[in-house]
Amino acid sequence: MSIEINNESGVEVRQEELVRLIKHILAAMFIHPQTEVSVILSDVETMEKLHIEWMDEPGPTDVLSFPMDELRPGTAGMPTAAGLLGDIVLCPFIAQEQAAAAGHSMEEELLLLTTHGMLHLMGYDHGEPEEKEEMFGIQRELLSSFLGKDAPRETMK
C-alpha cells in the first residue's frame, strides 16, 4: 500500500493519523493492499484555483477528489485489484473554519474530509438524495469505526 501525503498548506497536520485512517478505509472497503493514494494538503489560494478549474465553482473548497483507476469497493471474498485509487486535496484552512462552526477540532474535520474524499475516489457521490444518504451513511460508519466513537457532524457544503 502506498499512501503519500504532501503538506503544502503551511499548517501543521498530524499526517500519521491521516495515513492510519486511509489504511482503515481501504481495509474496510476491501481495496487491494497495494493500492496507491495521494493526499495533498493545500493552501487556500491553490484550493481556489483547483476548485475553479475542475468544478467551475468560485472560491476555495474543503476537499477535492481526483479518481484515477476507477476502483470500486470489493468484498471479503473478492477484494479489488491493485491500482491507483487517486488523489485527494484537502484545505486545512477551510477545515479549521468548518470545525470551529461545527464545534469539533480541525483534526476531526480533516478526518471527516479525508473519509469523504476517499469515498469519492471509490465512485460514491451525493448529487441525489438517495446517493447522499448512502454516501454519508458509509462515511459515518467508517469514521466512527476508526475513531471508536460517533463521527463528527458533516459540515461540508
Image: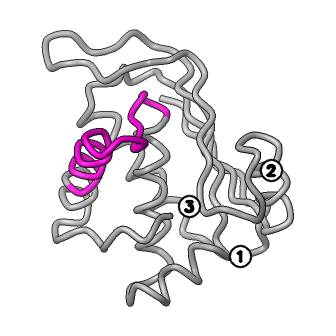
Please, what secondary structure does the residue beneath circle 3 have?
helix
Residue where numbered disc 2 is placed = 52
| Marked residue nearer the N-terminal end (1 or 2) | 1
Give the number of the disc on residue 11: 1
The answer to whether 132 is drawn above or below residue 47 in the figure is above
Confirm or deny contact between disc 1 and disc 2 (CB under 8 A): no
Choose between 3 and 84: the one closer to the eye.
Answer: 84
Q: Position of residue 62 (x, y in %)?
A: 60, 63
Residue 133 is inside the magenta segment: yes
Please say if 70 is above or below 132: above
The one of 9 and 135 positioned closer to us in this rendering = 135
Nearer to us of marks 1 and 3 is 1
Q: Which residues are magenta?
A: 121-140
Q: Residues within 10 Å of mark 2 (few under 14, many from 20)?
A: some
Q: On the picture, is 101 further left or further right than 96?
A: left
At label 1, the amino acid type is Val
- Check disc 2 and give the amino acid type: Ile
User: For this view, does 1 lie left or right of residue 88?
Assistant: left
Which numbered disc, 3 or 2, marks the residue closer to the eye? 2
Measured from the top left, where is residue 32 in percent x and y?
36, 19
Q: Position of residue 8 (x, y in %)?
A: 79, 60
Query: Mark 1 Cα within 10 Å, few/some/many (few <14, many 20+)?
Result: few
What secondary structure characterizes most of the magenta part? helix
Foreground residue among 129 and 153? 129
The three-letter code of the residue at mark 3 reads: Gln
